[in-house]
Image (tube, rainbow, N blue to C red):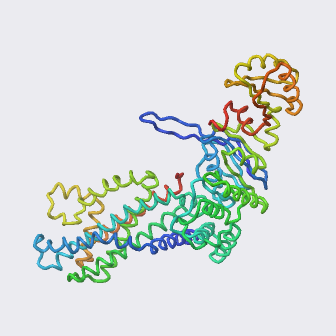
Amino acid sequence: MIETRGLRKSFRSRQGRETKTVDAVRGVNLQVPAGEIFGFLGPNGAGKTTTLRMLATLIEPDGGEATIAGADLRKDPAEVRRRIGYVAQGGSTWDESTAREELVLHARMYGIGKADAHRRAVRALEAFQLTEYADRKCKTYSGGQRRRVEIALGIIHEPKIVFLDEPTTGLDPQSRAHMWDEIRRLRTEGMTVFITTHYLDEADALCDRIAIMDHGEVVAEGTPAELKREISGDVVLVGLDVANTPQAAQLLDGEEYLNKLETVDEGGLRLYVDEGATAIPQILRRLDHAGLVMSSIELHRPSLDDVFLTKTGRSLRES
Amino acid sequence: MKFARDTWLIFQRQLQLLLRNPVWVFVGVFQPVMYLLLFAPLLKPALNAPTQAAAYKIFVPGLLVLLAIFGGLFQGFGLIAELRAGVIERSRVTPISRLALLLGRSLRDVVSLIVQAVIITLLALLFDLRVFIGDLLLAYLMLALIALMTSAVSYGVALKVKSEDALAPLMNTVAQPVLLLSGILLPLTFAPGWLQGVAEWNPFSWAVDGTRALFAGDLANEKVWQGLAIIAVLAAAGVFWAARQFARSVR
């Protein structure tokens, strides 16, 4: 449904008298099959939005190619526009208009006739539970309502693909869960959904497949489960007094179930093991025998953050 | 066909939003009305005009051109608000014609200007101004072309600078000399030679002369078609340039 080859974009930015070239996207290759929720995960400034805006024909790539819903992005952007929907991060509704007016106008911008546009608006309002507010001005809506109007705008012409840029940023937890349901519903209706997010849990729970992006490049791609499996094994965190930590480290170092051992500055050990469930009893026994008292023990299954950490050397939460 | 439909769609939408808040049309007309009521009465003695009506025939056309220039140049502010709300970006992901995105808006501005011009003209009638309807309509065509050009340029510049803080001083800096060099308030026949020479290069000066000739009932005056032609060419160029700004990447 989406295929990109070496998509690139750089921007020139001026700081004082110096002009710097920033490579926002440096060669992105992607393959997104039809009917899945595909997620772009990465920190702010990783190039997610720039890539999305290129795919949505809003900015022209410096290099590379892409085929979107069968249309060539470089040669026929007008056809791409007809086949996709795009919902920007910063909103797209006008304060003084009502949801119904916005929906009808937007449908008509796609060349849909007046009567049909009205019918579609009614259906979209119902599907997104907006009927009640349909004729109120957008400025009176809550954040969640407004976001639902925006998604409804993005799909009013029934595109094959819809791009959602950070669809849940700034929403409260309840609206967020609601939005996830809406996005899943789009998939059920046969749409391919392409989202960007910097939330780990969102990528994990919502997306069928994800690409992790950092510094303008895709550093990993796969289903969340696959990616986590690549990070071999579990992590066991053992809480100890600072004074006891060296002794414990010495004791456990070299155990055959242990892949790697790190000491934690505030006291304690970080143990990389293949299988947490079998390693923990052995760790406990060993420390108990030596009379070392633990303050805590935690089993840490790999998360997408660990995937990000291994691929980029940084934690997503820090960047 | 598609282009005409797209333009109509944007025009309708913009007009609808304007009608929802028509106070802006009247705010726009307030300043020229003040000039008409509080400044124009000074002109008969100052210009040595034979009658009050004669003074108005010189002053009102200039006032209308002034209204068209300023009304157009400041339309960009509304567009920056739309830009910020994401409405422009939302339009740009649809296959709608980029020229229509501009022209629909500029035509709305033209309509709003003509409404204002009619208000001014009607008020001027109370002060014994008399114009032939045919001449008046041609004068309105001139005003419409001026507003089309200035509003298109304002939209184009707004898309380039993307901030009100930059747009306001820019538009003022451009508008002031253009205004003073076009003999809008007083005819440039009073100006020293060098000033007249500079004004020759100001297209709006031609527009003002042409409009004055029309108000004087002097349809045969070559300034009429010259002014119309110059402004029409500039309006086409302005629209073309601004539509390209809509087509290019905007953030």
User: Is residue A302 depicted above or below B155 in this figure?
Assistant: above
Residue A120: which quarter of the image? bottom right
Instruction: Pick the residue in front: A107 or A4.
Output: A107
Instruction: Pick the residue in front: A244 or A208.
Output: A244
Residue A187: which quarter of the image? bottom right
Q: Is residue A228 left or right of residue A27?
A: right
User: Is residue A309 depicted above or below A129 in this figure?
Assistant: above
Quarter of the image with the N terminus of chain B is bottom right
Task: Indicate the position of residue B208 as horizontal and vertical percent values.
Answer: 26, 67
Residue at image position (67%, 48%) is A196
Instruction: Pick the residue in front: B185 or B35.
Output: B35
Q: Is residue A198 left or right of residue B129?
A: right
Task: Indicate the position of residue A268 as horizontal and vertical percent values.
Answer: 73, 25
Residue at image position (36%, 55%) is B168
User: Is residue A64 depicted above or below A253 in this figure?
Assistant: below
Task: Indicate the position of residue B2 as horizontal and vertical percent values.
Answer: 59, 69
Task: Indicate the position of residue B65 as horizontal and vertical percent values.
Answer: 30, 68
Q: Is residue B22 left or right of residue B48?
A: right
User: Is residue A175 depicted above or below A242 in this figure?
Assistant: below
Residue at image position (59%, 62%) is A142
* Numbered-mark total: 0
